[in-house]
Image (cartoon, rainbow, N blue to C red):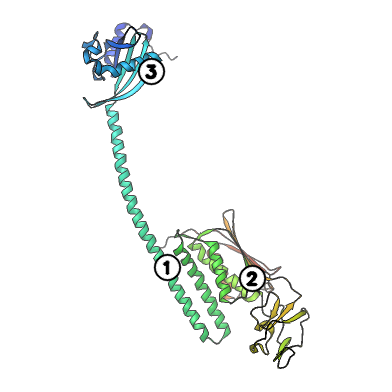
Amino acid sequence: MKNTGLDIFSLTSEDYYTIFENMQEGITVYRIVYDRNGNVVDLIIKYANPASSTSRVFINKNFRGKSITKLYGSNAVSSLIMEVNEIVSTGKIKKYETYSPTIDSYFSFSAFAPANDLYVTLTTDITEQKKAEQYLRNAHDELEVKVQERTSELLATLQEKELLLREIHHRVKNNLQIISSLLNLQIPYIKDEQSVEFFKESQNRVKSISMVHEKLYQSKNLDKIDFGSYISNIVTNLFQTYDVNQNLIEYDLNLDSIELNIETSIPCGLIITELVTNSIKHAFPTDYGSCSESTISTTEKSEFGNGGLQISDLRSRNEIQHLQQKQDYDSRTKGNCISEVSKSPVLRTYGFEGFTVLDTEKNEKSKIWIKLYSDNGKFRIIIKDNGIGFPEGLNFKNTESLGLQLVNLLINQVDGSIELNSETGTEFKIEFEELKYRERI
C-alpha cells in the first residue's frame, strides 16, 4: 500500500468530527428503534453534519437525539421507515436518487446499516448535475426537431430534383427516338443499299443511347441501370432491325444482374451494338453453306404444277438431300435462288414458301452468344458467334471499318481492354471497370 503519511487508525474522534463537519456530502447517523416484533418503527438522530440540512428530511445538528416520527410525523417518514426495514433485513447498501419539490433540488442517497442498531445515510446534492443533464436533453430534442425539419426540406428538394432528372431522361429519350424515327423515314427514299446500311447502323446507335435514358427514367435509382436487361434490349432491337429469322440465326444470353452508371453504360452499350451487328451482318453470309442462283431455279413446267425446280448444279461441299412440297409456291420465287428468297427455312435449311431444302453437311445452328459477369471487381463481356470467323490478316484495332474504329475508341473511353479469338467463329472478350462520375465544369 502506498504510504500517504496518514494513519487513519491514529485519528482521534475530534479528527473524524472535523472531517465529517466539513464534508460537502451530508452524513446522518441514526439509532434504530424496533418494536416487539423486530420491525423498525422509528429512528433517533445521533449525528448529522451541516450538509445534512439539505437532505430529504432536512436534518440539522439541533435535531440530535430527536425522533424523526415526532419531528416530521409518522406519515411523512413512513417511506423512510420501510426502506430501513428493507436494508436491515437484506444487509445491502441501497442507492437511489430523489427530488425535493420544496427546494427544487435533486439528491443522491446511499444508505446502509453497519450494525444492527445503526442506520447511516450519505446524501449528495446533484441538482446542478441534473440541470446540466436536462439542458443537454432539451438541446438534443431541439436539435432533433431542427434535423427533422431540415431532413424534410432536403427530401422535398431531392424529390424535386429526382422528378426533374426523370423528366430530363424522358425528354432525351423522346428526342433520340425522334431522331431514330427520322432516319427510319428516310431509308425508303435511299436507293443505294450501302447507304441504307449506314442509316440502319446510325439508327441502332441512337437507339442504344436512347435505351439507357429509358432505363434510367424507369429505374428507382437514377444513377444506375440494370445492365443485363439493357443488353437484352439491345440484342432484341438489332434482331428486329435486321429482320433476322431466328430459325436461321439465334442468340443466347447469359447475363448476370449487374448495375452500372450512365457513364459506363452508354459506351459499353455502343460497343455491344457494333459487335453484335457485325456478327449478324458478316458472320453468316447468304452464300455461306447455301446454293447459288445456278443451283436451283424455277421453271415454267413441272410435275408439281404451274412451276417446278431444276437442279442444275450443286456446290461440292453441300449435298441437297430432300425436296418437299409444303404448299403451292408463290410466283415471286420464279428464277430466284431458294436461299435468297426464303425467310422461313430452319437452320442450314434453305427453301422458299413452296419447298424446303435440307443441307446435310452442317447441322450446327448459327448462333450468337453474349455473356456478362463480374470477376474480382472487374466486369467482363464476351460476344461470340460460330460463323465464318474474322478475316485472316485483318487487324481489328487498325481498320477502316467505322464500327470497329468506334469500338476501339469506346474501349479506351471506359479504360478497358478487348481481345479477339477467331479460331472457331469470332469471339471478342471485353474487360472494364465502372467509370467514376466526373464533375462537369
* Label 2 sits on residue: 250
> Which of the 4 image quadrants contains residue 64?
top left
- Please state, as top left, top right, bottom left or bottom right, where the N terminus lies in the image: top left
Q: In front here: 366 or 24?
A: 366
Q: CA distance from mark 1 to mark 2?
A: 32 Å
Q: Earlier in the sequence, mark 3 or mark 1?
A: 3
The disc at residue 93 is 3
Identify the residue shown where x is 28% and y is 17%.
78
Q: Label 2, secondary structure: give it.
A: strand
Position of 22 compared to 376: left or right? left
Q: Label 1, secondary structure: give it.
A: helix
Q: In front here: 91 or 383?
A: 91
The disc at residue 170 is 1
Q: Mark 3: few, some, or many residues within 10 Å (few <14, many ≥20)?
A: few
Q: CA distance from mark 3 to mark 2?
A: 85 Å
Q: Label 3, secondary structure: give it.
A: loop
> How many marks do you count on the picture?
3
Q: CA distance from mark 3 to mark 1?
A: 73 Å
Residue type at numbered disc 1: His
